[in-house]
Amino acid sequence: MDVQHIKRRDIILKRELGEGAFGKVFLAECYNLSPTKDKMLVAVKTLKDPTLAARKDFQREAELLTNLQHEHIVKFYGVCVDGDPLIMVFEYMKHGDLNKFLRSVLSDGVAWGGGPSDNARIQFTFCLKIGAHGPDALILVDGQPLQTNGELGMSQMLHIASQIAAGMIYLASQHFVHRDLATRNCLVGNGLLVKIGDFGMSRDIYSTDYYRVGGHTMLPIRWMPPESIMYRKFTTESDVWSFGVILWEIFTYGKQPWFQLANNEVIECITQGRVLERPRVCPKEIYDMMLGCWQREPQQRLNIKDIQKLLFTMMKAAPVYLDILG
Ligand code: AMP
């Protein structure tokens, strides 16, 4: 499919949303994008004063994004390349990136008086309530995805994880290795809709191949398995390892993995075979899933389809799980 081109005059910048490796990200209004709406809100990523190499990367990335279409992959509308800066236009995800979202949920929870020290018990009480109304009863309320105390419950955490798994199943089906899966690269929209949203470091390689990075490339080592750290080997299985770390991030409300360690210590730790500890608010079944993602041998790791099935089973059984946790 061809990359869609959007006219600069159709894009009206409104405010800055954030800054990524690529450049600044803005909220904007875009005209003539949808046949049914005159204008719509979008997120635009800008690239100022690109070098020739950066321009090529930009073009490559736009082609790649045009061909990735799935309900759990952020929608890419097209590019604006007439003049400077170069712009990529994406759907706007109202609640921003998942890491910030998870952190804000925790601070809201504290503000409500729950307090992190009581988290475990509070979560379980609330989840039992969710169970009584069906597991998704509180997820789908637009604008109010959270529970009354402002915290995420177990079934909501599982719902977030299963949507990322759905996006990953699609990527694997396209033989696409992401290489940088982390909550910071997922976006949250209305009604707790979660999508994988940043492909800055990704490469469309077959899972039997691997990609070598040289020079000064920044590597997300805290999310990487031993073989990626040691041999720069990135595969669908290394994405599964990162998914385990995403689960850990969700269940710690967005903590940085190995936050207590410096980068060189993290490398030592992971290559020696140590894994992250079980978060305080995490059922054994979910920690077992993390451990299944963190098998040293890539072929021994859980596969992403099985992970999604397990997540569904746990979501259905959430109240039962919570009973045994108490
Ligand atoms: P990135 O360059 O993708 O790392 O984006 C930097 C920041 O901009 C993210 O952490 C988000 O907070 C925000 N952002 C990026 N894309 C979107 C989007 N499609 N909708 C809303 N916010 C976004």
Image (cartoon, rainbow, N blue to C red):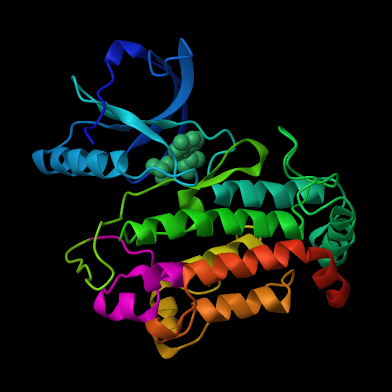
Image spot of residue 182 (x, y percent): 47, 58
Image spot of residue 287 (x, y percent): 64, 77
Query: Ligand 1 is found in which quarter of the picture?
Result: top left
State whether residue 33 is above or below residue 307. above
**212 on left or right of 101:** left
- Residue closer to the observer: 5 or 166: 166
State whether residue 75 is above or below residue 214. above
Residue at the bottom extreme of this rendering: 272
Total marks drawn?
0
State whether residue 248 is above or below residue 19. below
Q: Is residue 237 magenta?
A: yes
- Residue closer to the observer: 252 or 140: 140
Tell me, yes or no, if residue 259 can be seen here. Answer: no
Image spot of residue 63 (x, y percent): 23, 40
Q: Tell me which secondary structure the magenta stretch mostly adopts.
A: helix
Tell me, yes or no, if residue 150 can be seen here. Answer: yes
Image spot of residue 170 (x, y percent): 42, 55
Residue range corresponding to the magenta coloring: 217-242
Image quadrant of residue 307? bottom right
Tell me the quadrant of the picture where the N terminus can be found.
Answer: top left
Q: Is residue 25 magenta?
A: no
**62 on left or right of 45:** left
Tell me the quadrant of the picture where the C terminus can be found.
Answer: bottom right
Q: Residue at x 85, y 46 (%)?
A: 112
Q: Residue at x 39, y 47 (%)?
A: 198
Q: Residue at x 45, y 70 (%)?
A: 240
State whether residue 310 is above or below residue 21. below
Q: Residue at x 82, y 67 (%)?
A: 120
**190 on left or right of 25:** right
